[in-house]
Image (tube, rainbow, N blue to C red):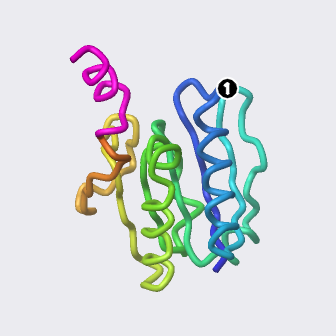
Amino acid sequence: MKFVAVTACPTGIAHSQMGAENLEQEAERRGHDIEVEIQGAMGAENELSAADIEAADAAIIAADTAVSRDRFEDVPLVKGTIKDAVNDVEGLMDEAEAAAGGDADTEVTTGEVDETADADHDSGSPEVRRGGDRSKGLVARIKRLLS
């Protein structure tokens, strides 16, 4: 399968790059092709062309900032947070594979998406909580350390 993705975070210094790298590694591990556009403090890197998007089986937007979805109207779209791309890339890729097998009008939302940061969000799309194992999170580890 061929995927395109956009990663973006408000600061755009590290998480966007980490998410992009995770998506690339997971796609390679599964035998898929992926092109990832990184939107960060320095602007857009590896900007996706119209041909890249048209050739894709599905698109992934992993962002905590507003990313225009206009370019992805003709491909199934999976929307998640940058945290999903960093901590739960397997789940995000599973959603993309499922969306690629479905209709082009499919849009899947994962994670806890900030509605105010994504002005063109379709409020009718399903919200699914995704994320890493909470027992491995920073707060859980600090609680174990202090107890």
User: Is 43 contained in the magenta span?
Assistant: no
Badge 1 density bin: few <14, some 14–19, many ≥20, Cα 10 Å: some
Image-quadrant location for residue 36: bottom right
With respect to residue 18, does 36 lie above or below? below
Range drawn in magenta? 135-147
The residue furthest top is 146
On whether residue 146 falls in the magenta region, the answer is: yes
- Please name the residue that numbered disc 1 is placed on: 41
Q: Is residue 27 above or below residue 16?
A: below
* Position in image of residue 109 (x %, y %): 35, 58
Dot 1 amino acid type: Ala
> Looking at the image, which residue is at 26% across and 14% down?
146
Q: Nearer the viewer, residue 86 or 119?
A: 86
Say whether residue 124 is left or right of residue 13.
left
Image coordinates for residue 47, horizontal then vertical, percent: 75, 51
Write down the quadrant of residue 147 in the picture: top left
68, above or below 98, in the image: above
Judged from the image, the secondary structure of the residue bearing numbered disc 1 is loop
